[in-house]
Every structure is written in C-alpha cells, then in structure tokens.
Amino acid sequence: MNFDTVLFPSEPRSFPFRRGVKTLLRALHILTTGVLLGGHIFAQPQEALMTWLWASILTGLILLATDLYASCAILLEARGVAVVVKIGLMLLIPVMWEQRVALLIAALIIGAVSSHLPRTYRHRLLFFKDKIVVDQRRG
C-alpha cells in the first residue's frame, strides 16, 4: 500500500452509522454557528461567545475529519476548498474581533452556497482530475 492510496482510496472509506453521525454533527454545527452569529449581532459579551466560537470550529473540524477519513480528495474539491476558507475565516475572529460579524456572515454565506450547489459543482475536483476518485455519496 502506498501513500497515495491511503490518502486517496479508489473507493471512499466508510464507518458505521456514517450518514446519521454526519447529520447529527451538521445539526450541531448549524446550532453552534447560529448561536454564535446571533450573539455577535446582538452584541453579547466576548466571554459568552468564545465557547460558541470554539464549538463551531470544533464541530466544523470534526465534520471535515469524517470527510477526510473517506478520502482526502475533499481538499481538492470545490466543497473542500470552501470548508478550508470557512475555517480560516473562523480562526481570524479572535485576531480581528472588530470584523467578527462580517467574517461570520461571509463564512455562513460560503457554507450555505457551497453546501447547496448541485453535486456536479460541489464535488468538482479543482486539481488532479484524472488521478483521484471523489466521494459522491449522499449525507
């Protein structure tokens, strides 16, 4: 087994209850980011929002980890690039506190648009199109 087949298997890996786990994680991610954005819009104190910020980052990273387990091809797809950009925006919040609402809104818009694109665009490989198999399963 070589390194390429570990990172980019010819058939995406799975785990028990994959769809249910991802659905639950996605719901938790939407909950945490919704509370976080609302808290910032309604000017809640920073101390009250930091837990929600890290919870949204953590749930997003766990969601990404489930996709990376299937295949690292996600990082080369349009949806994966969108996820990396969103994580970058979220990690900027503690550093660029005054721009936090704009950063959160940008992440929300990128997430909503990228997750609702047709599958052909969402799973489109941006790099190495002829060498990698993408995970096109639902859920």
Image (spheres, grey):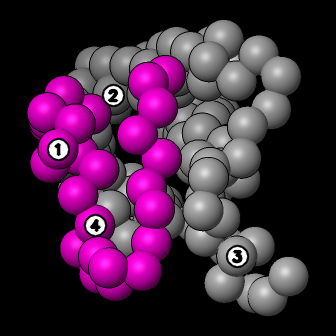
Q: Earlier in the sequence, mark 2 or mark 4?
A: 2
Do labels 4 and 1 touch, CB within 8 Å? no
Q: Which residue is mark 3?
A: 5
- Which three-letter amino acid code belongs to the residue tagged 2? Leu
| Front-most of residues 85 and 123 | 123
Main secondary structure found in the magenta portion: loop
Q: Earlier in the sequence, mark 4 or mark 1?
A: 1
The range drawn in magenta is 113-139
- Locate residue 126: give its quadrant: bottom left
**Label 4 CA crowd tier, 10 Å (few <14, some 14–19, many 20+):** many
How far is disc 4 from disc 3 in space, using C-alphas? Answer: 17 Å
State whether residue 20 is above or below residue 60: above
> Residue 78, image x and y in percent?
25, 59
Residue 131 visible (yes or no): yes
Is 3 contained in the magenta span? no
> Residue 41, image x and y in percent?
24, 26
- Which three-letter amino acid code belongs to the residue tagged 4? Leu
Q: Which residue is mark 1?
A: 120
Do labels 4 and 3 touch, CB within 8 Å? no
State the residue at coordinates (80%, 32%).
15
Is 134 contained in the magenta span? yes
Q: Which residue is mark 4?
A: 125
Taking the image as shown, residue 99 lies to the left or right of residue 63, namely left
